[in-house]
Amino acid sequence: MKLVGKIFINGKIKLETGLHIGGSKTALDIGGIDLNIIKTSESVPFIPGSSLKGKLRSLLAREYGSFDVKDDIPKVKELFGEEAPSNTPTGQITRLLVRDSFMNPESKSKLDNREEEFKDLELKYTETKWENTIDRKSGTAQHPRQLERVPAGAVFNFELVYNEFDDLKTNEHISEIKKAMRLLEDDYIGGSGSRGYGKIKFIDVIFEKKDIPNYEKNNQRELATYKW
């Protein structure tokens, strides 16, 4: 197969409920947060590409009845790749690249300036939420823990890059990507989704394309014919 171009899917991810994607705890503070979120070196929350890609793949695979990557149907493997089996020299290449999604500058500014929707946040870019379990016999709360989350209303920029080959599967693959994104909107990303976390909305989605001549000449993207 020959690479003939790249299709870029760009837009924004808006949080409709709080988001918790776990990070590492660098210090043990008495009375501090038990479960932190992942952040950049500047302490700004972001959505790792691995989290977004993994969720898109799992939702798409689940639609086809697969709960193990080894059982994924060919079109899912074509999009997301496949490790080489032990008795073969190569696996399936990954066509879909998923970038880390960093906080939209306008959204970051609203958080920095504590605008109305974010005025009650306890921390600079995040909020805290207490979680516990309920003893079914006594009805009392047990094992309280404090979670950190990005608040509803925060916005992140995202980019997906699809590598287009000359095997005439592009339209089918783009349809599958859009379907996976729509499934995710009615599901969740990150942890504690069954408790209301991680509902998102894809907004301002644009499809652009660069074929090989673009790279050879002006390196500019052109609007693609695909619609969100």
Image (cartoon, grey):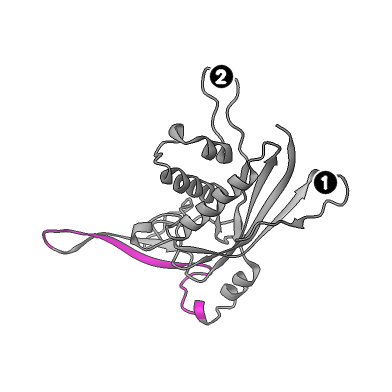
Residue at coordinates 34% horizontally, 65% vertically from top-left?
130
Q: Farthest left residue?
A: 137
Q: Residues within 10 Å of mark 1 (few under 14, many from 20)?
A: few
> Which of the pair 99/135 is nearer the observer?
99
Q: CA distance from mark 1 to mark 2?
A: 34 Å
Question: In the rendered view, would you say 166 is above or below 130?
Answer: above
Asked if the residues shown at circle 1 and circle 2 are in contact, with their CB atoms under 8 angstroms apart, the answer is no
Q: Quadrant location of residue 208? A: bottom right
Task: Identify residue type, mark 1.
Answer: Tyr
Q: Is residue 121 magenta?
A: yes
Mark sitting on residue 215: 1
| Residue lying farthest to the right in this orientation | 217
Which x, y percent locates residue 4?
A: 75, 40
- 144 w.r.t. 217: above or below: below
Of 131 and 70, which appears nearest the observer? 70
Mark 1, secondary structure of its residue: helix
Q: Earlier in the sequence, mark 1 or mark 2?
A: 2
Residue plotted at (76% across, 50% down): 210
**Residue drawn at x 45%, y 31% as measured from the top left:** 70
The residue most toward the top is: 87
Which residue has dot 2 on it?
88
Tell me the quadrant of the picture where the N terminus can be found.
top right
- Magenta stretch, residue numbers: 117-138
In the image, what residue type sits under mark 2? Answer: Thr
In this rendering, the count of numbered labels is 2
Asked which quadrant contains residue 92, the reply is top right
Question: Magenta span has 4?
Answer: no
Residue 41 is situated, as x and y percent measured from the top left of the image, at 61, 55
- For residue 136, side relative to residue 43 (left or right): left
Q: Secondary structure at mark 2?
A: loop
